[in-house]
Image (cartoon, rainbow, N blue to C red):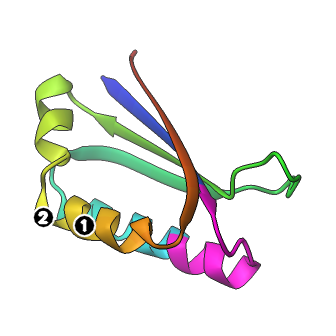
Amino acid sequence: MIVHNLLLKLRDGSEDNVAKTRELLLGMKDKIPYIRELKVAADIRRAESSYDLALIAKFANMEDFQAYLPHPAHVEIGNRLKSVLAAAAAVCFEE
């Protein structure tokens, strides 16, 4: 199983904007068949050093993860997020 972790810091970290972005990200689950599991959680600490959202997506194998990256639904969401992101960090690992 491949686990993809993504941290997102939004330019506007208001609760409303975080909630909207979370729903946008969760919408990928029904559109991208390669995703086995998807969790998107909002930060509850709200410290200056915190990121606003954590996305954890699981894939059966690296081939499915590689197929997810250029999937039109993923690309569309990525393009929409570019203008609202202040920072992002990712870690991928095998479990």
Q: What segment is highlighted magenta in the picture?
A: 9-21
Q: What residue is pinned by disc 2?
A: 72
- On screen, 51 above or below 15? above
Front residue of 50/41: it is 50
Q: Mark 1 is on which residue type?
A: Asp
Residue in the picture at 18% in, 46% down: 68
| 39 is within the stretch colored magenta | no
Residue in the picture at 13% in, 51% down: 70
Front residue of 55/12: it is 12
Which structural element holds mark 1? Answer: helix
Circle 2 packing at 10 Å, graded few (<14), some (14-19), many (20+), is few
Residue 30: numbered disc? 1
Mark 2 vs mark 1: which is more N-terminal?
1
Q: Mark 2 is on which residue type?
A: Pro
Q: Which residue lies furthest to the bottom in this view?
A: 16
Q: Which residue lies furthest to the top in this view?
A: 95
Residue in the picture at 68% in, 84% down: 16
